[in-house]
Image: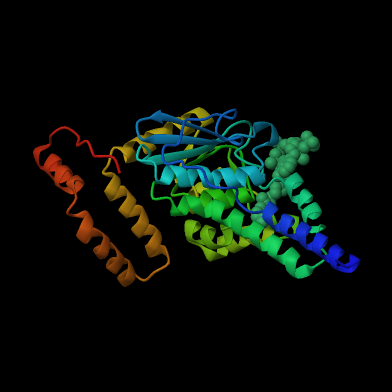
Amino acid sequence: MSLPRLNTLIKLTSKSAAIRAIQMPPRRNLSALPESGPAGHFKTLAVSSPKPFVFHVELHRPSQLNAINRQMWMEIKECIDGLAINPDCRAIVLSAAGKHFTAGIDLNDMMSLGQILAETDDYARKGVVMERMIKLYQDSISSLELCPKPVITAVHKACIGAGVDLITASDIRYSTEDAFFQVKEVDIGMAADVGTLQRLPKAVGSQSLARELCFTGRRFEAAEAHTSGLVSRLFPDKESLLSGALALAELIASKSPIAVKTTKENMTYSLEHTNQEGLDHIRLLNKLNLLSEDFAQAVAAQLTKDEKPVFAKL
Ligand SMILES: CCC/C=C/C=C/C(=O)SCCNC(=O)CCNC(=O)[C@H](O)C(C)(C)COP(=O)(O)OP(=O)(O)OC[C@H]1O[C@@H](n2cnc3c(N)ncnc32)[C@H](O)[C@@H]1OP(=O)(O)O
């Protein structure tokens, strides 16, 4: 082989290596996700099941302020996708260890992206590397929205940048009174690209406020997050926040898993569709769901004021 051709081949091989480097590792079967801590299954998350059918997922890089590095992006998706199909999980609480909820994307990780990009001179291939990375991170955040089990985020202190992307993809947001939020992407010279621009306006119900927050990157406090609807309940401290979030998860987990799953699916669907389309969607789901044991059992329990029904695993 001629030297120029060999050089091109070597370059192309390292380009493919760069592209592979940002792809997901093979998926593990997590339909029965084990409890794990920072030393266990996940390196950046601590996962436990503190109550029946309730899972607690903690962002767990406390000494890095839970800055979201590549590994955490991947583990969030792997964990939530696993819980999505785990019959022992009916509700998820997502909180964080240490001083802050999260400092957003790990800026050191972002700096090392330069090295990967330097592996190729070809702008189209650099673009592929970037696109795959953004997609990987988007899918990580969207896993919360796509999960059929309700995800409750419990935020304390700083929730910055990617943290806002993360919580706006959750179903219910609680926070401490000392929490603060920042759509900080604009301050690092980028438009938010993993969900805040799509979900924050819907969460706060005001394009004006959402655009102000996204254009300026200004810090807003828990009180404003509460009055704007981003957060639905405030707690004086982290301990009461966690017990409030877990109590809510336990209540949700006591309901019919079919009813809760379908409610989430239809409410999420209805965000993007007309009322009529939403009604058509729920009609299709419920023509099957209303034939379930859950429905018969729950109706009977309501009528007889009997003991709480025990629903089969889903
Ligand atoms: C395809 C991409 C998709 C996703 C994009 C996401 C974008 C974003 O997330 S934009 C936001 C990026 N994050 C930041 O800009 C955070 C900036 N940090 C802060 O505002 C403060 O550090 C914070 C309020 C979080 C905490 O303040 P505190 O006073 O408690 O601590 P500090 O003394 O400021 O920080 C302690 C050390 O942590 C380092 N650090 C903070 N944030 C990050 C981070 N995101 N990544 C890496 N390292 C971080 C900070 O530099 C301090 O380090 P040292 O000086 O060495 O102690």
Lateral position of residue 186 relative to residue 10, left or right:
left
In the image, 85 versus 269, the foreground residue is 85
Lateral position of residue 89 relative to residue 218, left or right:
left
Q: Is residue 305 above or below residue 287?
A: above
Q: Residue at point 78% right, 49% down?
A: 112
Can you say which quadrant of the picture contains the N terminus?
A: bottom right
Return the x and y of residue 299 as percentages of the image width and height: 14, 46
Q: Residue at point 58% right, 40% down?
A: 179
Q: Quadrant of ligand 1?
A: top right
Lateral position of residue 288 relative to residue 229, left or right:
left
Q: Residue at point 13% right, 34% down?
A: 306
Q: In the rendered image, which quarter is residue 283 located in? A: bottom left
Q: In the rendered image, which quarter is residue 221 located in? A: top right
**Is residue 23 among the parts visible in the rendering?**
yes
Q: How many marks?
A: 0
In the image, 9 versus 222, the foreground residue is 9
